[in-house]
Amino acid sequence: MTKTDFYYKSQDRHTQIHAISWAPDGKVRAVLQICHGMVEYIDRYDTFAGYLAGYGFYVVGNDHLGHGESVTDDSKHGFFAQPGGNECVIGDIHFLRKMTMEEYPDAPYFMLGHSMGSFLLRQYIESYGKGLTGAIIMGTGTQPGASLAIGKRLCKMSARFHGWDYRSDRINNMAFGSYNKAFEPARTPVDWLTKDTAVVDAYVNHPWCSFKFTVNGYYTLFSAVQAAQDKQRIAKIPRALPLLIVSGACDPVGDNGKGVKKAYRFYTDAGIEDVQMKLYENDRHEILNELDKDVVYADLLEWLRDHSPAVMMNTVTHDGDEREAAPEPEVKRPPMPDFLKDVNPGEEQAAEAGSSIDAMAEDTLKMLRQL
């Protein structure tokens, strides 16, 4: 495997976007582009990328604006662009895809988005889904439209008084304040990420994972979630585009699976022909960094192989010689729990959904009055 750092100019016209590629030693059998999550950086996916490279995948991804090395200085962490932060981030993702497809025009092309990256990917495929072989939506969920609208209003009001680079504790608490409650007493404020304490400690102690989003960052995030959930936009996704939705069953971002199932139904209701969903029992937000990550890795590899043309998966070329592809990894999988067997449940009662929206809207309105 060859790991390479490179840079390209952002759609904001002045930031250099940092990206990494992981190239296999032999023939590239398929491409996977990764969209990372909020308050992290692309090199956190190094282990997973190296794993896939061992099976002939070319893996590539960039640090989004305001993340990792894609900043003009450290004060810009958590800031995308103003105006047009959402458009710039989507544009940077698309530019990387175009560059990569020019290098590997015949390879099946997949994309994976985790957490914030899942919402960006969901938005991306609404405009640029054509030509993709498949998309993996990881660590996602749904949010009430009223709460997103009020959250954006909070950001605008805060920016009016303090500027778009202001970091609001109130908005930060609104977004993440409840995520750790299910894991109390907790060792750290981010125990909700994974059960692997070594991963949590590394995250807490890394400067690229410890900053607070600016109000510009939150406004961009809320805009991405709104776009991801817009049914008119979802209807523009190519119906033949395969989607895999995966999450931890104890992930607060996905409301412990409830929000993930709602996202699943967005796509089945829109007529997407191949939508699969899996929740990993007892896993939290970062399933690629969970204690059972070997199972997750193997499942994702299996799905990628199943959705790649057979000619790409059957053989791999090393120094001009055609050989059999690496065998499937042997992983002992636990039996599927009962609550995962029904991945297309009936609609919730309207009263329940309405009360949830009202409660969340009331909480954000209280914060608005205190701003």
Image (spheres, rainbow, N blue to C red):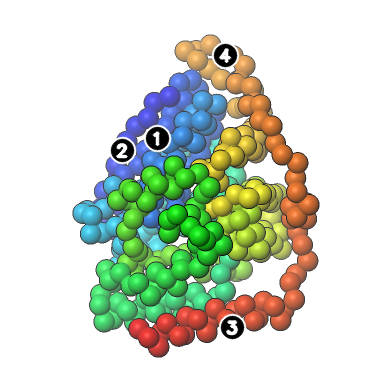
Q: N-terminal of the two: label 3 or label 2?
A: 2
* Circles 4, 1 touching at the beta carbon (< 8 Å): no
How many marks overall? 4
Q: Could you tell me which secondary element the residue under label 3 belongs to?
A: helix
Query: How far is disc 2 from disc 1 in space, using C-alphas?
Result: 8 Å
Residue lying farthest to the bottom in this orientation: 369
Residue occupied by mark 3: 358
Between circles 4 and 3, the one closer to the viewer is: 3
Query: How far is disc 3 from disc 2 in space, using C-alphas?
Result: 46 Å
x 59%, y 39%: residue: 292
x 32%, y 79%: residue: 158
Q: Is residue 95 left or right of residue 266?
A: left
Say which amino acid is labelled 2: Phe
Q: Is residue 251 above or below residue 206?
A: below
**Quarter of the image holding residue 322?**
top right
Residue occupied by mark 4: 322
Q: N-terminal of the two: label 2 or label 4?
A: 2
Between circles 2 and 4, the one closer to the viewer is: 2
Say which amino acid is labelled 1: Ser
* Circles 2, 4 touching at the beta carbon (< 8 Å): no
Q: N-terminal of the two: label 4 or label 3?
A: 4
Say which amino acid is labelled 4: Glu
Query: How far is disc 4 from disc 3 in space, using C-alphas?
Result: 61 Å
Q: Could you tell me which secondary element the residue under label 4 belongs to?
A: strand
Q: N-terminal of the two: label 4 or label 1?
A: 1
Position of residue 13 measured from the top left corner of the image (x, y, whole percent): 26, 56
Residue occupied by mark 1: 21
Residue occupied by mark 2: 6
- Residue situated in front as seen by the camera: 42 or 62: 42
Q: N-terminal of the two: label 2 or label 1?
A: 2
